[in-house]
Image (cartoon, helix red, strand yellow):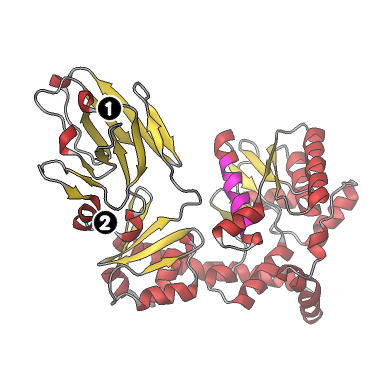
Amino acid sequence: MLDAVRRFIEEHDLFSIENDPILVAVSGGLDSVVLLDILHRLRVQVAVAHCHFGLRGEDADADEQFVRKLAKQYGLPYFAEFFRTKEFAEQEGISTQMAARLLRYRWFEEVREREQLAAIATAHHQRDQAETMILNLTHGTGLAGLHGIQVKNGHVVRPLLGLGRDDLHDYLVERGLRWREDDSNDSPVYQRNLLRHEVLPVLREINPNLDQTMAATAERVGGAEEIVRRYVEDTAAQARRDEDEVTYLNISTLQKTAATTLVLHELLRPFGFSWPVVKDIVAAFGGESGRRFDSPTHRLVKDREHLVITPRRTSQYGTFQLVAGQTDLLADGMRLKAELHDDAKHFIIPRSKSTAALDADKLKFPLTLRRWQEGDWFMPLGMKGKKLLSDFLIDQKVPLNLKDEVRVLTSADGKICWVVGWRVDDRFKVEDATERVLTVQRM
């Protein structure tokens, strides 16, 4: 078993067994216990991660305690996170299972980056692969769904995907390993369990080697997907432009592609847009600007010649203050860096929209960062008169979903000194008489 997993890791270039530190997702179930033991015996540098979703009461508490002890038994670093999964699902309007998945992988990546680990290993195997493919086919899917679970997806790797569930069970018995059984795995409430216990046994009567057959099919479909991926990449090189957290797709370029809906679906798949929604987007190509489409994670707006895609915020910006002398302000993902320059005569004004140069002596602290509001006005740099911010954003042809993200920095007297990332207010500009300059940069 060890040799088989080693060969699989090397064949698919998942990570370096000798050199790369790995975060292993361990639920306490049979599969993840086997994965942890195998990687430990292969002398991989391992850290253990466990998710408590707050869904199964005392059983979930016992799972966490079991995994904690297991990590201690192996002498490994241990990380655990407790999620309010149902609250998050309700807030985002998604299923509990989808919420758990989003929370889980988001947190895994946070731990991986913080601890400087090379990859995140999960315990998916051939039976999981077969279940996923058939479940995707039942719901309707494209090439991505037909190849099922990927061996490597970004930093997530599946070292056991070449093995069957029986292989893992035999290994566990041979090693005398203990594990925790999740009762929810038998509940018919979940579609995967219904498929696992009612549908797949019938299919295995037709083909006893169903798991291996589905794995081979996934490999062939993966090859076909690679051909499509290269065509999509060529299209993206011509149609796509990325700026900060905003993605623009040129509609005219998309319309010239073969199978436009399929190509656009592949381009939008990382943003979570479903096939029916993509069909509606294509149908809106010739319509008026402003049509909005949402996925669980992103918002897309049809704006003149482009599709404009931005993340949907899971938390809303509030009001944040920058006091005199403070150099950093972090506001729900937006970071501002402030720097005071005492010698204005030798100061060169930055040309970047991401940096504001302000006359420090005209400012009144604390400065406030907040959302723009209807009725807000300012004096755009180069103008002497007032202008409603809403009109300014229209003049700048700011798409609807980007308008929602616009923030203003105000002086303590309420005057807008900077429309962040767009324009400084003329009243706070750097002039010949300016003695000190405050630069504020959006990082």
- Which residue in the structure is indicated by mark 2? 398
Task: Tell me the kind of residue under disc 2.
Answer: Val
Q: Quadrant of residue 233?
A: bottom left
Instruction: Give the residues in magenta.
Output: 99-110
When the figure is inspected, residue 320 is found, relative to residue 124, above or below; the finding is above
Question: Can see residue 237?
Answer: no
186 sits to left or right of 23: right
Looking at the image, the residue that sits furthest to the top is 342
* Residue 22 pos. (x, y %): 64, 40
Q: Quadrant of the C terminus?
A: top left
* Residue 218 pos. (x, y %): 61, 69
| Mark 2–mark 1 distance (CA, rounded to whole Å) | 29 Å
Residue 387 lies in the magenta-colored region? no
Nearer to the camera, 59 or 141: 59
Residue 109 lies in the magenta-colored region? yes
Residue at (56, 74) in percent of width and height: 141
Q: Give the crowd class for mark 1: few <14, some 14-19, many >=20 residues within 10 Å.
A: some
Question: Can see residue 197?
Answer: yes
Looking at the image, the residue that sits furthest to the bottom is 206
- Which residue in the structure is indicated by mark 1? 364
304 sits to left or right of 259: left
Residue 297 shows which numbered tag?
Answer: none
- Camera-nearest label, 2 or 1: 1
Nearer to the camera, 438 or 309: 438
* Residue 343 pos. (x, y %): 18, 17
When the figure is inspected, residue 298 is found, relative to residue 289, above or below; the finding is above
Question: Considering the numbered disc 2 on the image, is that residue within a helix, a strand or a loop?
Answer: loop
* Residue 77 pos. (x, y %): 70, 33
Residue at (35, 35) in percent of width and height: 368
